[in-house]
Image: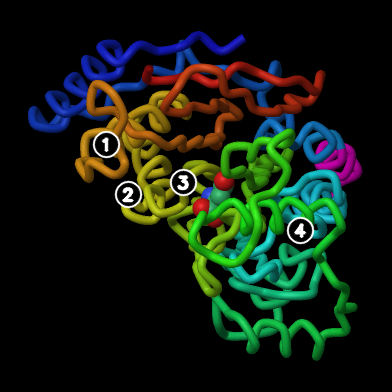
């Protein structure tokens, strides 16, 4: 299991890195503490905790010699198409008007290309549309009606993404919003669960040390129509640098956008941090910069969660989040398992 790094540990390592930089020394490496694939050159697939089937599938395809991005996308497609995961794709929780709007981006390390779609309706697998944006346009991001037209143009089938379970959850949320509107309260026997969050990311490293990644989500449940989180934003919900490593995120998208989270995690790895240290450093910055009282709970800590997942070119990987209790899925070439995420608090 990943060893939780305490904050003091992170800070002292950061201080060391800064001191080394100021003295003009080569960046320090802390790779000794990193989780890694058992053998050099062994492929790795890492995903969020809802991605055990994703890492299994991605590894199967990596072993069969498929491109790393195709492997990652095939892995997340399983969850996008699964109505029981209400945070991704088909069956995802809708926006405040009851319409499911999906966000996704992907990045292909070897060719340094990316594609993304945001606020896409009616298509179960936005990750695949993101890849077609990458392959068939000179753009990176298409949104809303334009993204849907583009998907139609490329033969994607349209479906009503709102399942009965998601519709019922939305109705319950809507009826619970206010005592002053004309909707009657839902039956008291069924308390409203906390506003659900979720997303899936998958990063792959193949046996040629090529890195790719994808992130896909239905976004924040009951969001304002048109709201876009971090998941389709290159540099926020995903970043891949084929020379260094990759990072993907889940959790409060606004915090990840503001911190340019995944990009900074990759930059941290460039400067010598292990994947886990790189993730913890950005989480620490997010906590330090969160000062809005609406976003704080006791001890001045954020009242939200952010998770980062990262892999580097050497096959080292890690996951971290703000609060204890997170996990991530990883297939390291020998076994597929859930690992404990490192944490700040
Ligand atoms: N990151 C996603 C978003 O903000 C949601 C999540 O991962 O829970 O849209």
Q: Secondary structure at mark 4?
A: loop
Which residue position is annotated with label 2? 259
Q: Bounds of the magenta span? A: 57-66
Would you place residue 88 above or below residue 162 in this image?
A: above
Q: CA distance from mark 3 to mark 1?
A: 14 Å
Query: Which dot, 4 or 2, sits closer to the camera?
Result: 4
Q: Which residue is mark 4?
A: 89
Q: Are marks 2 and 3 in contact (CB under 8 Å)?
A: no
Circle 3 sits in a helix, a strand or a loop, which is it?
A: loop
Q: Is 190 positioned to the left or the right of 83 in the image?
A: left
Task: Select label 3 or label 1 by which is in front.
Answer: 3
Assess disc 2: are there few (<14), some (14-19) or many (≥20) residues with their C-alpha within 10 Å of its C-alpha. Answer: some
Q: Label 2, label 3: how many angstroms apart (C-alpha)?
A: 11 Å
Q: Position of residue 237 (x, y in %)?
A: 51, 52
Q: Residue at x 67, y 74 (%)?
A: 120
Distance in Å between CA atoms under marks 4 and 2: 25 Å
Q: Residue at x 27, y 36 (%)?
A: 285
Secondary structure of residue under mark 1: helix
Can residue 121 be spotted in the picture? yes
* Residue bearing mark 1: 285
In front here: 133 or 301? 301
Choose mark 4 or mark 1, whichever is in front: 4
Q: Can residue 67 be seen?
A: no
* Residue 185: image location, x then y, percent: 64, 51
Residue for point 28% across, 23% down: 298
Q: Which mark is residue 64?
A: none
Q: Earlier in the sequence, mark 2 or mark 3?
A: 3
For marks 4 and 2, the one nearer the N-term is 4
What residue is shown with label 3? 252
Residue 225, given in percent of the width and then of the height, sits at: 55, 73
């Amino acid at each position: 299991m990943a060893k939780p790094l305490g904050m003091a540990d992170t800070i002292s390592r950061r201080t060391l890195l800064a001191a080394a930089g100021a003295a003009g020394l080569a960046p320090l490496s802390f790779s000794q503490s990193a989780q890694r694939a058992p053998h050099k050159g062994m492929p790795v697939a890492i995903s969020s905790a809802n991605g055990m089937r994703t890492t299994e599938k991605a590894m199967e395809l990596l072993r069969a010699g498929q491109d790393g991005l195709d492997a990652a996308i095939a892995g997340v497609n399983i969850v996008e198409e699964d109505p029981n995961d209400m945070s991704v794709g088909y069956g995802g929780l809708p926006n405040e008007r009851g319409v499911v709007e999906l966000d996704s981006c992907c990045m292909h390390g070897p060719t340094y290309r990316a594609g993304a779609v945001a606020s896409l309706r009616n298509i179960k697998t936005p990750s695949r549309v993101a890849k077609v944006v990458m392959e068939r346009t000179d753009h990176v991001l298409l949104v809303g009606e334009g993204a849907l037209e583009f998907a139609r143009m490329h033969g994607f089938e349209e479906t009503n993404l709102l399942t009965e379970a998601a519709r019922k959850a939305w109705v319950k949320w809507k009826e619970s919003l206010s005592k002053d509107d004309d909707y009657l309260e839902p039956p008291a026997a069924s308390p409203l669960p906390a506003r659900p969050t979720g997303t899936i990311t998958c990063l792959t490293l193949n046996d040629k040390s090529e890195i790719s990644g994808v992130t896909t989500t239905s976004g924040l449940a009951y969001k304002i129509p048109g709201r876009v989180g971090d998941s389709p934003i290159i540099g926020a919900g995903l970043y891949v640098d084929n020379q260094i490593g990759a990072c993907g995120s889940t959790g409060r998208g606004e915090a990840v956008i503001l911190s340019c989270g995944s990009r900074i995690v990759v930059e941290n790895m460039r400067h010598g941090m292990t994947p886990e240290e790189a993730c913890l450093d950005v989480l620490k910055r997010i906590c330090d910069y969160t000062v809005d009282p609406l976003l704080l709970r006791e001890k001045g800590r954020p009242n939200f969660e952010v998770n980062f997942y990262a892999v580097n070119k050497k096959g080292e990987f890690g996951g971290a989040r703000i609060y204890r209790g997170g996990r991530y899925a990883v297939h390291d070439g020998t076994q597929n398992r859930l690992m404990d995420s490192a944490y700040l608090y």
